Image (cartoon, rainbow, N blue to C red):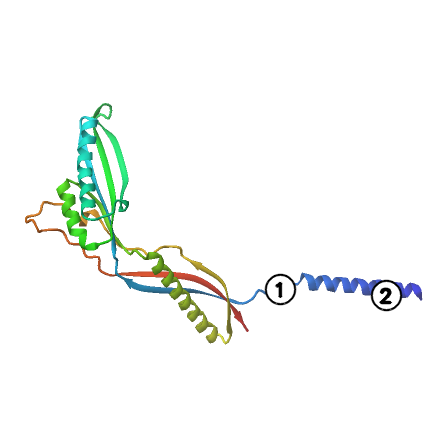
Amino acid sequence: MKKVNSYLLAALTAFCFVNTQQVLAAPQQAPAVIYVTGYAEKEAIPDTAIVSLGMETSAGNLDVARNNNAVVMNKLNSAMVGLGIPKEDIKTTEYRVMPRYDKNGEKIVGYMVTNNLKIKVKNLALLPKLFQQAEAAGVNQVSNVEFTCSNTATLKSELIQAAVANGRLVAQSAANAAGAQLGKIKEIRINGRYPSFSIVRPENVRLMKANAADAMPVLEQGSQKLSESVDMVFYIEE
């Protein structure tokens, strides 16, 4: 009898062990989630311009090429300061000296010097005078003119908040349609870009001799549409 009870006890122990292992090994069901993209946009009026101006000079002698370039760029720098643009808003972005070779590419026949300045203009009313002064100084290069806002960080924050609110609204609508309750946010991904403003390319800006003393180029910044999107994941509660 004791022997039979031992067999029965061993069998029950094995059964319990197997079932316990099955319970522990059973995969847990992942919580239900919903994926949405929140979007927001707004019109912004730029209040700042970033202007890239420069000078390219060529001469058979390196010192002559450098001197001719320096004369123009020094005049430009002085003119910008004279317009009331702070020195910290005038930055050299490129200074390059390159040899020029003959048609066989063997002998140096001259040198080319390139010098570019990036100028931040916080008073857009100065733009016409800026281009007039640049032309008077002898500048022969305009890389681009970019309109932007001084408060891009604030604009981005406002757009992100609006995009998140939009994403929650979309998720709530989807949950209601599915007969479920919207839960907490599991994940938010922001695209990480700052508001992008348009750039006027060189072909749209020419420094040319004016026919009259008061004839100056006028650039309108207009208003620009900025947008932001966020990817969001919400839990769904049955």
Relative to residue 213, is residue 169 depicted above or below? below
In percent of width and height, residue 124 lies at: 21, 54
Between marks 1 and 2 in the image, the one whose residue lies nearer the viewer: 1
Circle 2: residue type: Leu
The residue lying at 19 percent from left, 57 percent from top is 220
**Image height check: is 194 above or below 114?**
below
Classed neighbour count for the residue bearing mark 2: other residues with Cα under 10 Å, few (<14), some (14–19), many (≥20): few
Q: Viewer-proximal residue, 215 or 191? A: 215
Report, in whole angstroms, how far the alpha carbon at label 1 lies from the one at label 2.
33 Å
Q: How many marks?
A: 2
Q: Foreground residue, 192 or 28?
A: 192
Residue 235 is left or right of residue 86, and the answer is right
Q: Is 138 placed above or below 20 here?
A: above
The disc, 1 or 2, on the residue closer to the chain's N-terminal end is: 2
Instruction: Say which quadrant the C terminus sits in.
Output: bottom right
Asked whether, in this view, residue 7 is left or right of residue 86, the answer is right
Q: Secondary structure at mark 1?
A: loop
The image quadrant where one finds the N terminus is bottom right
For the point 17% across and 35% down, the residue is: 71
Q: Quadrant of residue 14?
A: bottom right
Q: Does 185 appear above or below 201?
A: below
**Residue carrying label 1:** 28
Q: Residue placed at 44% from the left, 73% from the top? A: 173
Residue 41: quarter of image:
bottom left
Query: In x, y percent, where is residue 217?
Result: 14, 51
Residue 135 is situated, as x and y percent measured from the top left of the image, at: 14, 43
Where residue 215 sits: x, y (%)? 9, 51
Judged left or right of residue 52, residue 153 is right
Q: Amino acid at mark 1?
A: Gln
Outermost residue to the top: 107
Residue highlighted by disc 2: 8
